Amino acid sequence: MSDTKEMRSLPALPQAVGFDPASTALIVVDMQNAYAARGGYLDIAGFDLSGIDAVNANVATLAQTCRDHGVQVVFLQNGWDAKYTEAGGPGSVNQAKSNALRVMRERPELQGTLLAKGGWDYALIDELSVQDGDLLVPKTRYSGFVNTPLDSMLRSRGIRTLLVCGVASNVCVETTIRDAFAHEYHPVMVEDCCLQAGPRAMHEATMFNVRTFFGWTTTLAEVDATLTAPAD
């Protein structure tokens, strides 16, 4: 990382965020077939994927823009081993509440397919791939910070500001943002690069929570304009 700071001001709500691209990371949350492709877990479970095509395109654009302008790109990838040992034991709250595990209990023919490492459902969507210089962090719970090396990977690179995007706004995106706040990062949700699980009101509620309690929200256009503008 360069010792020279290149401070920029990103338009956001509730106020602009000052950041240095060299100390900023883009956290791409769970942009996997399970969550962002038709025929994946969310689709099978009956969640509305309207708008996912636009979100997928936006995230791909955002990731490349960040790479081109010195922002570290980090992919989070959610799921478990093929035998679901990582999902928790019989008394695990994850076993009790995971919708994917519930769907497989109700539909045994799906057992071993949803969010299983090595399978199509677990893989990143076709529009995205881990490129040279990107980081990939597997996770087994909603938050990217729980039982993962994410925090140490970010701190060792001097990262202070996080741009956060992905699926689902109100589940893994919001949970990761809450934990980022608790770990003293400055999280900024890129709102049109996220899709909720459930009614659109869930996305709006997450934006309210982020703006009011945990960080800031912005848009792809604002990030693009800020990163591509000549430095002061």
Image (cartoon, rainbow, N blue to C red):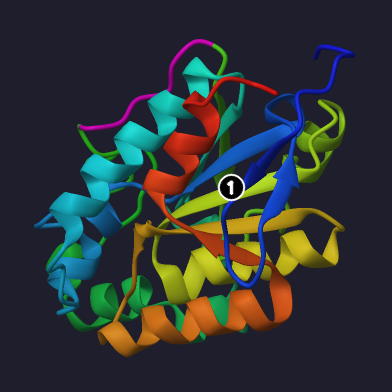
- Could you tell me residue 212's position as x and y percent? 67, 83
Q: Residue furthest front?
A: 232
* Rendered view: 142 above or below 64: below
Specify whether 89 is left or right of 34: right
Q: Depth check: 117 or 54 in front?
A: 54
Q: Depth check: 142 or 127 in front?
A: 127
- Mark yes or no: residue 56 visible: yes
- Mark yes or no: residue 92 visible: no
Q: Is residue 9 magenta?
A: no
Please name the residue shown 64% across and 64% down the image: 177
Residue kind at label 1, given as amino acid type = Leu
User: Which contiguous range is marked in magenta?
Assistant: 127-132
Specify whether 137 is left or right of 108: right
Residue bearing mark 1 = 163
Q: Split into 4 quadrants, where in the image is the C terminus?
A: top right
Residue 122 location, quadrant:
top left
- Could you tell me residue 44's position as x and y percent? 14, 70
Specify whether 37 is left or right of 85: left
Residue 219 location, quadrant:
bottom left
* Rendered view: 213 above or below 10: below
Please name the residue shown 16% across and 68% down the image: 49
Please name the residue shown 52% across and 26% down the image: 229
Residue 88 location, quadrant:
bottom right
Q: Depth check: 187 or 79 in front?
A: 187
How many neighbours does mark 1 have within 10 angstroms: few (below 14), some (14-19), or many (20 or more)?
many
- Could you tell me residue 83's position as x and y percent? 42, 53
What's the magenta bit mostly, secondary-structure-wise? loop
Please name the residue shown 33% across and 89% down the image: 201
- Could you tell me residue 218's position as x and y percent? 50, 58
Specify whether 24 is left or right of 138: right
Helix, strand or loop at mark 1: strand
